[in-house]
Image: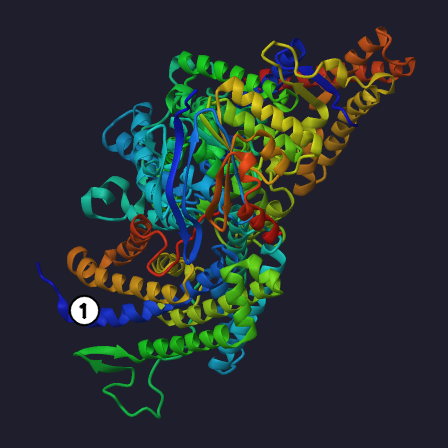
Amino acid sequence: MQRVALLEVSDITVRFGGIVALDDLSFTMDEGQILGLIGPNGAGKTTLFNVVSRIYDPTQGSVTFDGQDLTAMSAHEISRVGVYRTFQNLALWPGMTVIENVMVGDHTNTKSNVLSSALRLPSMRSEEADLRDRAWAALDELNLTDVAYSPAAGLPFGTLKRIELARALIANPRLIMLDEPASGLTHSEVDSLAQDIKDLRDRHNLTVLLVEHHMRMVLGISEKLVVLNFGRKIADGDPDVVRNDPEVIEAYLGSS
Amino acid sequence: MNWNFDVLPDFIFNGLSLGAIYGAVALSLVLIFKATTLINFATGELAMLGAFLVYVLHMEQGIWLWLSMAIAMGLSAGLGVLIERTLTRPFDPEDHLPVVLITLGLFLIINAVAGDIWNYQVRILTNPFGKFPDWVPSLGGDRYVEVLGSRLKYQSIGIWLTLALALFALSLILNKTKAGLAFRAVSSNVESARLVGVHTGRTLGFGWAIASAFGTLGAVLVAPQLGGVNPNMMATILIYALAGAALGGLDSQGGAVLGGILVGLIQAVLVTWGGVVVFGQLYMSILQLAAAFLIILIVLLFRPAGLFGTRRVERV
Amino acid sequence: MSTPLVVVAKDSAEHKKWKYAQWLYLAGFLLLTPLVLEPFEIGKMNRALVLSVAILAVNLVVGFNGMLALGHSAFMGIGAFVTASMVQDENWDYWQVIPIVLIVGFIMGVIIGLPALRVKGLYLALVTIAQAAVFPTLVNIDELGIAARTGGPNGKGVSEEVIAPDFLQWLPGVTGARGGSAYRYWIIVVMIGITLMLVTNYLRSRPGRAVLAIRDNEAGAAVYGVNLPVVKTMNFAISASIGSLAGLMWCLDKGFVAGQDFTFLLAIDLIIGLVLGGVGTIQGSIVGGLFVVWVNDLTKRISIPLGLYTLNGDGPLAKAIFGLILILFTFFAPGGIVSLARMVQAKLIRVVPLAPSGEPIQPIESFDPGMESTRADAAMKLSIAGPVCLAIGWLAMNINSLIVGVFAFGFRMIILFAPVAVLVATNELKAHAEGKRPDSIKGPANTARLLGLLGTAFVIVYAAQRFILNY
């Protein structure tokens, strides 16, 4: 079956002062694909996430998603086309409960405004009830209902990472970008996370852009690999081919 | 309309000397902001306390004015270090609220304690530049020289020279001493500075110390223009200094001084054309304060980092 | 004590009982205030409640959105002057001015918030401090008829008297000597009630959650579709609007407004109230307002005998004590009084939330301490503490010292917990009947129930007697 390119990163360059964080990076991603983006520390993986989610402006180049130019949008508009992400060092809201965090996850697709909320109009109440049910379902899917009403702080790192995942899932994303979801997890947790990501992809028709250092996991679930080193793409393609690429081996062995 | 250009140079000279003082207080704000990324709302009150120290030492104890100033600056520096060490260091500077609360609390305490000791009457403090010293040949008057048909007061010249000297000393300290180097390292990146072995705590204290000393200098210089010292003397000065710091950029020493001077000049122009000519004498002070507020708003609208400040790149 | 004394499922019958009891206490407090306080004390209470609304406004920006707005005295001033001018010059009624004040406040909030909120961090603090400092001078400007409207340096009085109409004469307190201030008290209470309800609804739904998300993590909020400048500015404008409403209430309460009422020092008072009450909690705003006024009163009264009260009006050291309190709270109780109260509450009750199925997310039984339960003992201690503290407090009230008096007052309030002892003891006896408790709990539980009932009866009789006596 011929898949359609969903995300297209073309000629992205990001410079901070004299430092080139990303150098003319291009790759494409098909709908429904799990793409592993790997590379040594400082290779520019998180920088790419920040460009796609519009926290950084690229110096040049463009990112198109389903035919729309993401670089012309601002950060809060990205979620409207269905692009969501998690954060390497978590970006939860510890002042709210876990379920409220997940409810904010669908901010883009809900409508209640200041007036309807302050007056608790019927439209707002039904939307709120529905939102709460869906947030509960998202938490249930990731086995998080036990902590639903705890503050989103002070929980184990792995749990917090899963809460971020639930928060992204509730909005029915088309593309989800996971920034090191396995960091801080034990071996068995990593294996179950890998299975979870596959299952979620199948159930929710996701496209997954995955940044991860955990090689076994990346190689285990990725259908395509893109390898970065010092902001430059050094290889992309089928994982089995890429892993034997001499330049990739050199980048990894040479840097560690 | 009856434009009154004759008085303009007078007001410009005055604006430049007031502006220089705003610059000194703005510099005090900026030095602390650079070191700890907090705005010290007690800056004005610390400076006021310094001016009262000079008052006690000079007017009550009879110590030579300049020596009194040196002692007062030293003591304010010590107080700055003490405050930094005990009150602000326990808090994460990235979390703005607690440190702002601490400095607001200090504002209340210092103002109230000064009010309790010296009450709220204005007390005359000797003007360090009241008239030219005897060894200066007569230049037209014993308090001023004629420039462009206007009077350039000895006081203005004295303020400029003193602040120029102080700025020169500051740049020497920052650029030629080890403590200065450490300060510049810490203010550009605390983490990296700590990693290369800079004693960051001591350095932050150093920032507070020179900032407090500068504030005191500003307060002593401004006192004669306000008729003397009193516990509320710095309230409006602080607002102008904040405007100056915002205009120049909160993280630029040179910007703070220039920003302060610009605020002083804008005031002068407002007073001449707006205040005196259009609205009448009474509304000078109102317009000046409102101008400070408008300057801050306009700077934020068009150049949020100020004229000389650096934009920061967000890291996620 | 590892588990709290009472564990209930949300919205269960027992939870409702608990909530009703809280509402009852609140109602009792509100009803008795205008009846038992002296007229000048009701005036202070009114001022405290007005400040509470202003503190709520500050809290909306500082506590819930993490933005440092320090100049709400100016918004209060705008609201107060607009009200004074409309009522005095245009003969409008106070209630007709409410929408005008809300809109004017909102627009001012947008004008100031839009530039200040585009940049991060301390810039809003800069702008708002300047705003607070400038405001009192602006009302003196002659141009544009401003001074005529505001009364300039002399201030502006409102001659319309606020007197209860005939059909409201039944309100507690409004007949008799304290009538005027008591009626104004009731107006203010109703306005606060409505404001609190609307603000709570706002904060506990989609737009409010976006506001909190910005406070907790801006980048995260943006990625999830929160338009940062729009939400921040909107929230700031709502806050300015509520601040102006507090100004209207100020004018209504005092009948006189002057630029010197709305200085930077008032702005700092609001911040102090915010910190004392609890940053980021709605109840904290109300508590904060009460404390600012009463603590200010207290520091003044303490400083007189100590010889520290050297000026007319606020003694200078009263302000120093305020500054000290601010610093002490920042160090040792950053969550304010509300967080301390919540710690106590957590020891008493835990409400288990419900899953969509209607079941508690954890079974209530799983919290049962079983045969090792010490709840009966705790209930007994609580039931004994009430009357003992009441007696101590009553004795201490006779010692002519203000500080002792304050503590004595607090001591006497412990009797209010008597119903908790009854509830816990009854639960324990029920568990005993089901065989989940050893026989040894019967003694303490029965004692707790008896003393608790007596204490509860005392509270009810005492309140009713005070009510009837003064009504």
User: C36 left or right of C54?
Assistant: right
Above or below residue B217? Residue C156 is: above
- The chain that hosts pointer 1 is B
- Closer-to-camera residue (C427/C311): C427
User: Can residue C21 be seen in the rendering of this structure?
Assistant: yes
- Closer-to-camera residue (A236/B80): A236
**SS label for mark 1:** helix
Furthest-left residue in view?
B1
Residue B110: x percent and y percent? 53, 59
- Is disc 1 surrounded by few (<14), some (14 to 19) or many (20+) residues within 10 Å? some
Residue B76: x percent and y percent? 54, 68
Residue at left 31%, top 80%? B154
Q: Quadrant of residue A66?
A: top left
User: C337 left or right of A236?
Assistant: right
User: B196 left or right of B115?
Assistant: right
Inspect the image, locate mark 1, and give the three-letter code of the amino acid beneath it. Answer: Leu
User: Can residue C401 be seen in the rendering of this structure?
Assistant: no
Above or below residue C85? Residue B226 is: below
Q: Which residue is mark 1?
A: B8
Above or below residue A231? Residue C277 is: above
Residue at left 72%, top 27%? C347
User: A98 left or right of B280?
Assistant: right
- Closer-to-camera residue (B176/C417): B176
Q: Quadrant of residue C432?
A: top right
